[in-house]
Image (spheres, rainbow, N blue to C red):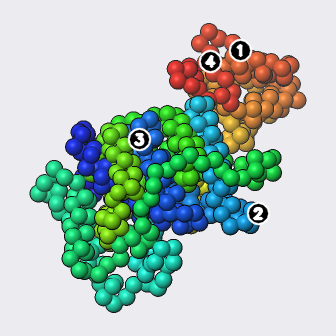
Amino acid sequence: MFSSLFQKKRGSWKDDSLAGLTTALALVPGSIAFAFVAGVPPISGLYAGFIVCLITAAFGGRPGMISSAAGSLAVVMVALVAEGNRRGGAGAGFEYLLLAVILMGFVQISVGVLRLGRLIRLVPHPVMMGFVNGLAIVVFLSQLRMFRHREGAVVGDWLHGQALVTMLGLVGLTMAIVYLLPRFTKKVPSSLVAIVVVSLIGAFGLPAQTVGDLSSVRGALPVPHLPGVPLTWETFRFVGPYAVILAMVGLVETLMTLQLIDELTESRGKGNRECVALGAANLIAGSFKAMGGCALVGESLINIGSGGRGRMSGVIAALALLAFILIGAPLIDRIPIAALTGVMFVVVTATFEWTSFKTIGKVPFSDVLVIVAVTAITVWHDLAQAVICGVILSALVLAWKSAKHVNLSVVEDSDEKRIYRLEGLLYFGSVRDFAEKFKPDEDPREVVVDFHEARVCDMSGLEAIKALAGRYAKIGKTLSVRHLSHDCGRMLERAGDLVRVEVAEDDPIYLVARIAGHGEKTE
């Protein structure tokens, strides 16, 4: 139902321009709200939206993806700012944060230069589904805060009575326009039309909370500003760990969002290039009193859903946000919060992987467990830890399953010699099952194990072969192995006379505990 919002199509200047304008409107309340969460001036969130969005859009590896101030970073920043204020007094926390953002940029650039962005390929699909579902829930819960009375950073009671009815009505109208308008015309983004229509309704006297109730977007051009903290070893010891955590959280959310946009647009972004661009953007942001940022799933999907496909969509979103800050504040401040909340609710319904419910009973229970675990950790903790936990859980499941698929069969048998064929992966998880399959007391004097259909993956596998050879040697029998890689053979030769390695021309070539790169022969 919702996949049509992100259908594959080629971008154009008109599509990119309108999509960028729509996305810029959606960036305003989020940037302000995340600044409040982090405990820093609201204008720093808007500056982050402009600087980070502009640089990543122009030079990043994923056209159409939107980066700005992010809630996932803000929840880490708030602890840094609070501790910084305790160390240096009121306002010092923000200065420490700026230094952390600059260091975060250096870390992210290093990750991109070292080409570590490719590690995102190790993220299994169930982890991706859990990540997307968790983010959809997080975005939904963040929008529920808009149903409270607000005055700047002060959040009051829940809306009730006429105010609640008005909020629900405008949100419903916004969602209806977004869903229904594309059935009649796709020349303009339905999200932009919905925001304009609801804003006009609010302008004609219907009382509703507006962007200005959060904080005015009025400001000046960002100017260079070096962090006002002493550059001592003690300062770096304090700020460094936060910088590394911020860098990792930002990279995980960015690379996961990049992968999601790749799937939606059936194209492929460049993860390492995006890492470098994001790092450069944060380095510059920290030098211009901006709180830094990373890719945003919600705003990226708004941009893609509105037709933004090229770099210009992000560039225009950044320039439009700057225009709002400099000259458009009187108009932007009057946009009803309900209009932007309605657009975000549409993003939530389109982002959530509703098909994940259909997987129950159709895919292995372990995959369902990974989806649920990643979703829960994303909602109750943070997405970086959720993805890491999901990858670890998936790896453990794979190791457990692979350990059960070590098969041993007899291919040749006589009174003097028996040849076994081993199939599967021999590694730390399967060595016990491997050892239990052999009965030295029942075998003839000479035993050969053929590894043509098996692979030794780690040192545990090599030690298991040596231990098995020792069991045969104790009762005066000989164990030989064939079709091992040259690397494994050389290591086993160090076992002396315990095991005999038979070398053949068609033996495989691979290295133990080495991940094969592109074009490397592995078997």
| Local secondary structure at mark 1 | strand
| Local secondary structure at mark 2 | helix
In this rendering, the label closer to the viewer, 2 or 3: 2
Amino acid at dot 2: Arg
Between 165 and 140, the one lying in front of the other is 165
| Local secondary structure at mark 3 | helix
In this rendering, the label closer to the viewer, 1 or 2: 2
> Of the residues under marks 3 and 1, which one precedes in the sequence?
3
Mark 1 and mark 2: span between their CA atoms? 68 Å
For the N terminus, give its image quadrant: bottom left
In this rendering, the label closer to the viewer, 3 or 4: 3
Residue hosting label 1: 502
Identify the residue shown where x is 76% and y is 63%: 87
Amino acid at dot 1: Glu
Between 212 and 389, the one lying in front of the other is 212
> Of the residues under marks 4 and 1, which one precedes in the sequence?
1
Mark 2–mark 4 CB contact (< 8 Å): no
